Amino acid sequence: TVAPTQVATAPQPLVQAAPAPVSTEVQMYSVLTVGSELALLSSDSPVRKRIFSYGRRFKSMQIVLLSGKTGQGIVQEGNVTVYPTNSSNKIFRYFDALAIGKATKGVDIVSSQDPFETGFISWLIARHHNVPLHVQVHTDFLAPEYAAHSFINRIRVVIAGFVMKRAAHIRTV
């Protein structure tokens, strides 16, 4: 029998590429966000001030706000627009959000506040516009305690699994 031959190779010198230059330009996208932060409707809210300041970084930011009957119409400030659903009940909020999201124009990215109900609606909107879906995760929904907390949480875990597989990007906070 012939023993396998080992060929020794000389170690190759490490070549390190120069780091890519950091761009000072902000990408100009039109973002559609689906969420439920009612503080966006209060003009003196720190949440509104923070979100609207984020919006200045984009070409436009449209926010579909899941809400009950607030009596408040569309809020526009600069390039940020908030569309409250003003729904008659919690179930209709999702259908109303879907209708508003589909009716928006010029969307480059759809972002969801969570991977649950709003995530599913955001996925449908992203598919309608044929754009990427970005999902934010604010809770550890894979912890056993989350699903054990309630029946609705067990359903949310299933929805999240569906939505997360379809997200182009996921942001955890």
Image (cartoon, rainbow, N blue to C red):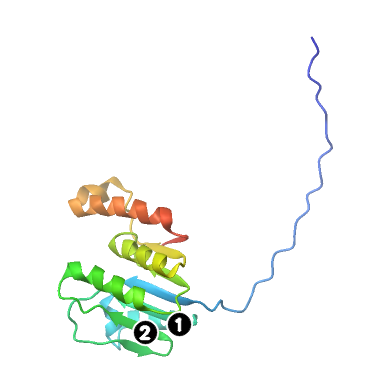
Res. 150 in view: no
Marker disc for residue 147: none
Left or right of 150: which side holds 59?
right
Question: Which corner quadrant of the image does residue 80 belong to?
Answer: bottom left
Going by the numbered disc 1, the residue's amino acid type is Ser
Q: Amino acid at mark 2?
A: Thr
Query: Looking at the picture, how far across and down is residue 115, in whole percent?
Result: 34, 59
Q: Position of residue 163 (x, y in %)?
A: 37, 56
Q: In the figure, is residue 166 to the left or right of 66?
A: right
Which residue is disc 1 drawn over? 60
At a point 31% along the width and 87% down the height, the residue shown is 75
Locate residue 86, reporting x and y percent.
21, 79
In what quadrant of the picture does the C terminus appear?
bottom left
Res 125 seen here: yes
Q: Nearer the viewer, residue 92 or 66?
A: 92
Q: Is residue 141 left or right of residue 12?
A: left
Q: Earlier in the sequence, mark 2 or mark 1?
A: 1
Q: CA distance from mark 2 to mark 1?
A: 8 Å
Q: Are marks 2 and 1 in contact (CB under 8 Å)?
A: yes
Describe the element under mark 2 as helix, strand or loop: strand
On the image, numbered disc 2 is attached to which residue? Answer: 81
Mark 1 Cα-neighbour bin, 10 Å: few <14, some 14–19, many ≥20: many
